[in-house]
Amino acid sequence: MKRLQGWGDVNTTYPVTEPARAFLTEVVGAPLNLKDASPEDIIAKIPKSKLKPHPLITTDPLERLQHARGQSASDWVDMCDGLIDTFPDGVAYPGSIDDIKALIDYAKRTGAHLIPYGGGSSVVGHLTPRKQDRPNLSIDMSRIDKVIELNQEDMTATIGAGANGPILEEQLNQAGYTLGHFPQSWEYSTLGGWIATRSVGQQSYHYGRIEPLFVGGHLETPSGPLDIPNTPKSAAGPDLRHLMLGSEARLGVITHATMRIRPLPKTEKFYAAFFPNWEEGVKAEMEIAQCEIPVSMSRLSNPVETETTLQLSGEESLVKYAKMGLNLFGQGEQRALLLYGVTGEPAMTRLAKRQVAEVIRRHHGLAVNFYLGPAWMRKRYLTPYLRNTLWELGYALDTLETCLPWSSLIDCNTAILNDIQHSLEDINERVLVFSHISHIYTNGGSMYVTYLYRRASDPLETLNRWKHIKGLASKRIVEHGGTISHQHGVGLDHKQYLQEEKGQLGMALIRSSIKQIDPQAIFNPGKLVDLEG
C-alpha cells in the first residue's frame, strides 16, 4: 500500500544505523523530536467538494487527500506537517479515451480545472491545486496501464499512459523486451508523466532519454484529439511530438504512446572505481563521454557524497576496512566514487569495461569490480526511502539538478555547494550538501545536488529554509548558463526561472500554444507558465 505521508510502499523502509545517526548529529546537529500531523486531522480540514455529481468522479475525502500533492519539499511539509490548504474537489478514474472525453466535456460545462495524475512522484509541484473558486478535479490514469500493441517487426510498443515502471516492464519483459527507462521514481512514476516532464532514466546513456524513445501518441485536449503518427523520421515541418514532451499537462491528457523498445539485454553488470579527487573524476567522465565509450550509466559522486554514501550504507565493518584499503592505494579523504554500468551484447560490454578501465588508470583511479556496483543495483530504488527515515528522525532532505557544459560544470558545482553549505549560518543551522554527475554527454553533464538540514519546530520555518536554499542554488544555475531542470520538469518550483532559458519570444510561443489548444485554461493551471505573461 502506498504511503499517504512520505515516499513509497508502507512496508518498505531504509534503516539508519546508530553510527550513521551519530555522523548526522556531528555534521548537521542533533535533530528535534517532532511528530507528523495525523491523517485524521488533515482529512478534517478538507472542505466540502464544489464539483457537481458525475458517475466517473468520487469525492471521498481520503482519495482527495491521496491526490493532493506530489513529492517536492513543500509537498512534504504540507502533507507531513499539516500545512496543506488546497485539495482536489474530486478524483476520477477513467478507463478509456471516451471516459477522458467525457471528463473534458464535464469540465467545459462546469468550469472545473483538470489535473492529470500519474504516480504522484513529481518533485516540483505539478500536482498542487490552486486556491480559487473554480473546483479542481484530479484525473487518475492508473486504469489505463496496458500494453495495447507490441510490434516486434518495428520494435515498438503502444502503451497506456498510466502504466508505471514495474507494470510497464513486466508486460514488456514477458515478451522479451524492455523500454529501458529507469528513473529513480520508477516504482510509481508513469509513462505519461515521463513524457510530460521530459524524464531521464538512470541508464539513459544506453537506452536514451524519454525524447528519442517516444515515437508518437495520442493527446486528448479541449480542442479535440492530437495524434502523432508512428513515423520513424520526418522532415515535414516542426516535430509535434515536442508539444507533448515537456507539456506538463497544460494541453490535455496523454492517453497512450508508442515507444521504441529493445530486446532484454544479454549482459548487464555494474562496477565502481575511486579517483583521488573530484577533478580527476570529472576529467574521466568527460573522456568516457567524448570517446563515446558504450557504458549504460556513469555516475560520479563528489567527496562529501562518497563519504556520506559510505556512512549511511549500514555496513560499518565493511566501510572501515574499505577505507583502510583505499588509503593504502592513495585514495584518501578527497576520494570520489564512480559507479558505471555496461549493458548489451557480451562482446560489447567486455570492450566497454576495458575502455573504462583504461580511462580510470589514466586518471589515477582504482577500479573496484565487486560489491559496490552490484550493491548500487540492488538498492537503486530503495534509496528514496531513506528520505522517510531521515524525516522521521528530524531531518529534511531535498535534491535539485541541472545540466551544464563541461567548461562551466566544476565552477557551478563549487558555487552551488558553497552557497548551500553556508545558507543557514545566520540562524546557526548547518547543512550537509553533496553532489554527483548523474548523466554524461559529449558536451556536458548533469549535476545532481542533495542537501540535508534540520527540521524546525515551526513547519513554516522548515519550509522557509528550503525556499532560501532552493533560491540560492537556482540563481547560481541561471548565472552559469545551466538549465533549470535536466529531468524533473518545471511545475511550480522552477517556473520563475524558465524565461531565462526560453527568452521572451520562446515564452510567448509556449503561452500561445496553450491558449490555442486549451482556450478555457482547463488543464493544470499555474504550472510551467502563467498565461498572463
Image (tube, rainbow, N blue to C red):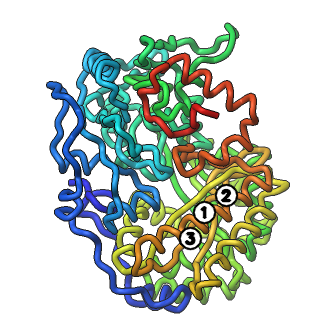
Q: Quadrant of the N terminus?
A: bottom left
- Give whichever of 68, 410 is nearer the camera: 68
> Which numbered disc flags the more N-terminal residue, 3 or 1?
3
| Contact, mark 3 vs mark 1 (Cβ under 8 Å) | no
Q: Position of residue 499 (x, y in %)?
A: 70, 40
Q: Amino acid at mark 2?
A: Ser
Question: Can you say whether 223 is above or below 278 in the image?
Answer: above
Q: Position of residue 353 (x, y in %)?
A: 65, 54
Residue at numbered disc 2: 474
Residue at numbered disc 3: 451
Position of 166 compared to 179: left or right?
left
Question: Can you say whether 209 is above or below 12 in the image?
Answer: above
For marks 3 and 2, give the one nearer the viewer. 2
Q: Amino acid at mark 1?
A: Lys
Q: Amino acid at mark 3?
A: Tyr
Question: Can you say whether 507 is above or below 467 in the image?
Answer: above
| Contact, mark 2 vs mark 1 (Cβ under 8 Å) | yes
Between the C-alphas of marks 3 and 2, the distance is 14 Å
Residue at numbered disc 1: 470
Between the C-alphas of marks 2 and 1, the distance is 6 Å
Q: Quadrant of the C terminus?
A: top right
Q: Residue at x 43, y 23 (%)?
A: 257
Q: Residue at x 75, y 33 (%)?
A: 504
Mark number for residue 270? none
Identify the element where label 3 is drawn. strand
Examine the rendering and report whether any part of residue 170 can be seen: yes
For marks 3 and 1, give the one nearer the viewer. 1
